Image: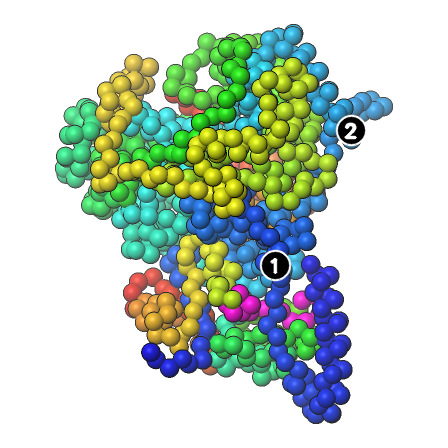
Amino acid sequence: MSKKTEPRYAMVVDTKLCVACKACVLACKSENDVPDGFCRDWLVEETRGVFPDLRAENRSERCNHCAHPPCVHACPTGASHVNEGGTVLVTHHKCTGCKACIGACPYDSRFVHPDGYVDKCTFCLHRVQRGKEPACVEVCPTFCLHFGDLNDPDSEVSKLLRTRKHKVLHPETGCEPNVYFLEGGPR
Amino acid sequence: MSGLTRRQFIQIGGAAAGTAAVGAGLTTNWFGADPDVVHDPGTEGDRVVPTFCELCFWKCGVLAHVKDGRVTKLTGNPAHPLSRGRLCPRGTGGIGLLYDPDRLKKPLIRKSKGGDQVFREVEWDAALDHVAENLLKIKDKYGPEAMALYSHGYGGSWFKHLLKAYGSGNIAAPSYAQCRGPREVGFQLTFGSGVGSPETTDMEHSRVITLIGSHLGENMHNTQVQDLARALDRGAELVVVDPRFSIAAGKARYWLPIKPGTDIALLLAWMHVIVNEGLYDHDYLARYAVGLDKLKESLKDRTPEWAFARTTIPPETIVETARFIAGAGPASLVHPGRHVTWYGDDTQRSRAIALLNALLGAWGRKGGFTLPSKVDLPSYPYTKYAHKPKAPPDMPKDTLYPLADSTLASGLCMASIPGTAAYDIKGWIVYGTNLIQSLPAPEQTMKAIQSLDFMVAVDVLPAEICGFADVVLPESTYLERCDEVHTPPYKEPFVAVRQPVVDPLYDSKPGWWIARELAHRIGLNDYFPWKDSVEYAMHRVKAGGFDCDELRLSGVALGKPTPVYIEDGLDPAFDTPSGKIELYSDTLEQAGFDPVPQYEPPEEPPPGQFRLLFGRSPAHTFGRTTNNRFLSEVVDGNEVWLNARVATEMGLKDGTNVVLINQDGVRSEPVPLKATQRIRPDCVYMVHGYGHDAKGLKFAKGRGASDSRLVTRYKVDPIMGGTGMNVNFVRVERWAS
C-alpha cells in the first residue's frame, strides 16, 4: 500500500466525445441551485477552417481550480480559498462581492450571485466528499467528463493524461489549471 | 430557493463576523479565524421517486428528488437501460415544465362575448359535460368514425382506448407521416420489420457509423448518443453525409457535404462500388437474402461519376468511402435516421439505406442492428370493443398509399375538409401535439379546423392548437401522474413505470382521469373499470410476474435477455413475402413502384433562393419545450444558418436580424443570422420549434422564427403518404424594423 497523500482534484474533458449538448450546464444549475441567468459551467464550440475543410472542437468549460489561483491571492477577505484536493472555493459569508477575484481570473469563471457573494464551480465538493462525482460528470451522456485525483497514478484522470494528447487553457498565465482537455488522437 | 440562500447569508455572516471580532481581537485578517465550510446546496431532497421522462419520446428513467414537496432536481436512473444514470439536457429540464408559470391551470370553454369569441374558465364538471355532449352528438349525427384523435405522448394511451371504445379507429400521430414513417416502411419492405423506437441500432459495437442527414448529438436521444460516444471512444469512425457541418460531422473521418435531396444517388453509387468490387457479405446474403442479381443489374450504371454530377461528391471520395464503410462490415452501421420526411421519395431513400445495410450484413449483427424482444406483459382484461370501425379516411378520394401501415395525421386533417376523402371527419381530440407546428402547411390545418363541429385539446401548455379548440383541458405533467407501463423491444428488455412525484398543480388532472370521466359520461363505464392508473398499471405488472412494490421502488425491472444478434446464436426471421431479406421488392413492383430505389432529381432552388432545411437542438423537443425557462437558460431561440461567403456577398453580417420569404411569399418572423462556414451555399438551416405566436406562451412567444410557417408546400410520398417538407425555398432579407 502506498502512503496516502493529499488528493489533487482535476477534471479531464474529452473533446473528441463532447457534443456540446449542455446537459452539464443544466445538471450543475439544478444540483447547485444556480440562479436564473447564471451558470457555473458553459460550452465553447470552436470551428476552424473554410468550407468544406473544417475542424471542430467542443469544450465544456468551468473554473480551472488552478494550482496557483490568482483569485485567491486577489481576495482581500480570505473568502476565496484553497480547499480539499486543491479545490478553489468561495466562503459565501466572508465574501463582500468586491469582484477583485473576477478581475484576477483569466478564465472568466466567476460571477456575483444575486445574494451578494461571488459564485463559481466548486467541483461539487459537497458531492465528492460523499463519494459522488460532480453533477456535470454524472449526467454527461457522452462520458466526456472525468473527475479524479491526479496524485493517484491509478485514477482514471491520471491514466487519461498519461495516454492521451491534452492541453490546458491559457497555460501562459502560469496558474497551472487543473481542468485538462483531451484532443483527438493518442498522445 | 434563492430565499433560503439569502437567509443563510445574513444569519451565518452576521453571527460569525461578531464571534470572530470578539474572539480574535482586532487582527488584520479577522475573517481568517472563521472556518471555511463546504456549502451544500441541499438539492438531494428528502425523498427520491423513480419515474420516466416525457420531455421527448425516448422515455429515459429519471430519479426525481423532492424537498418539502418541491422537485429540486431530476437525475438519470442508473438502473434504467435507456438512461444508465445519465440524462440529456431536456431530461434535467423537466422541472422547467412542471413549474412553468404559463401552464394551463383551469378548463376553458369557448364562449361568444359581444361578437368576439373568448375562453372562459370553468369547473371540470362543466367542461367534461360539454365535451361528452359533443362526442355523443357527433356519433349520433355522423357515426363514431367522424371523431379523430391526434395523440403524441405517452399519456395518450387512455384517449386511444377511449376512442376505440367509442367506435373510431381514426387515431394518428405526426410521428408517423411527418417523421419516422417512411423509414419504417423502407425497412419493413427489406427486412420485414422496422427499426422502431428506441431504434434497434447497435452503435455501441459498430466500427464504422454512417449518418445520412442524421445529426445525432444535436438530435439528442440519450441512449443513442451514449452509444455513439462509446463507439467513438473505442475508436469507431464516422462517415457523415450532411449539407451542414453538424456536431457529428465535426467528429467524422469523412464529411460529405452533399447537395440536398440527392442522397439516393450517393447510396446507389456506394452500392455500385460495393457490388462491383465484391465487398458485400457473400455468405450472409447467400443465406438470408433474395434478389442480389436483380439489384446488381439495376446498379450497373450508377457509377461514382454518375453520382458526382448529382451529389457534388467527387467520385474518388465515393469510392474511398464505399470501401471504408464496407471494410468494417458487418459492424458497419448505416444509421436509418429518425425524422426522415424530406423530399417525398423518403421511403425509397430509407430502403436504399436498408439495402446498403443488407449488403454490409449488418441486420441482426453485432455493431449493426439488434433484433430485440420485449417483456411480455399481458394487456389489461378490458371488455372487447363493441364496434368495428370503418377504415380511416386518411387519403384523398381515389388515392391509395398502398404501403402505409399507420394512420396519417396529415390525412385525417385533410379529411376534415368536407368532401375531400372517403368520409368527413367532424370532431378532433388533440392530445399533446401542436398540430399548427407539427403538420406542414399550417394554413391548411387552420382551414380544416374551421370545418369541424367540435374540437377539444388536452395539453399542459397553451400551445397554438389550443387557441382553435372549443374546450381546452389542462393536463398534469408527467411528474404529476401515472401512465401506461413502458416495455419496448430493447436489447435489455425491461418494464418501467411512470409514477406521480408530486400532486398535480393548479386544477390540472392526469390524462387517465380525464379519459375515464369522459367515458363515464358517454356510457362507456365498462371500459374503464379500474380506480386509477396506478391500479391499472400494477395489475399489468403483477400479471407479468413482477413484484409491484419492488418496481415502484426502483422504477424499472429487467426482463429476461434473449439473443439479439446472429453472433449470439439468434436465428433471424424476416417477415417479408419471401421470408428473406428482399434486395428486389416484388411488393413494390406489384404496387407500381420501383423495386429497387431509383434517383429522381429534386427541384432546384431558383437563383437568389435557398433550400430551407430544419433540424433539432439538443436542449429542446420541437416547439413543446421552447417555453421551458430552465432549458432556455442554455438555448433560448433559433438562428438561420447561411454560408459565410454567401452572407458576405449579400452584405449580411453574422448576428444581423433577417427575415425569410418563401416561394409563396410567406414571411418569417425576424431571426438572427448565423453566417457560418458550416453549411453549403445552396441551403439555409434552422432549428425547428421556434416562432410561437400563442400569447399564453409568454416566454416563447416572439422568440426566433418558425420553419413550420414557411413549409407551405410539401411533397407526398406516394408509397406511404409521408409529407416531405424540405421542398421549400426561401429568400433571405435584412429585417427592416
Label 1 SS: loop
- Quarter of the rendering occupied by the C terminus of chain B: top right
Identify the residue position indicated by label 1 in the image.
B43
Mark 1 chain: B
Left or right: residue B589 compared with residue B659:
left
Observer-nearest of A187 and B54 = B54
Query: Label 1 neighbourhood size at 10 Å, few (<14), some (14-19), many (20+)?
Result: some
Asked whether the viewer can see residue A93, the reply is yes
Q: With respect to residue B456, does A16 lie above or below?
A: below
> In the figure, residue B339 lies in which quadrant?
top left
Position of residue B529 measured from the top left corner of the image (x, y, whole percent): 59, 22
Query: Label 2 neighbourhood size at 10 Å, few (<14), some (14-19), many (20+)?
Result: some
Callout 1 amino acid: Thr
What main secondary structure does the magenta stretch of the protein show? loop
Callout 2 amino acid: Val
Position of residue B179 measured from the top left corner of the image (x, y, whole percent): 46, 32
Identify the residue position indicated by label 2 in the image.
B122
Q: How many marks?
A: 2
Residue positioned 40% across, 80% down in the render: A4
- Quarter of the rendering occupied by the N terminus of chain B: bottom right
Q: With respect to residue B143, does B605 lie above or below?
A: below
Q: With respect to residue B416, does B267 lie above or below?
A: below
Mark 2 chain: B
The stretch of residues the image draws in magenta is A113-129
Q: Report the Cα–Cα distance between label 2 and label 1.
A: 37 Å
Residue that extends furthest to the top in the rendered view of this protein: B141
Residue that extends furthest to the right in the rendered view of this protein: B114
Observer-nearest of A39 and B249 = A39
Q: Is residue A120 magenta?
A: yes
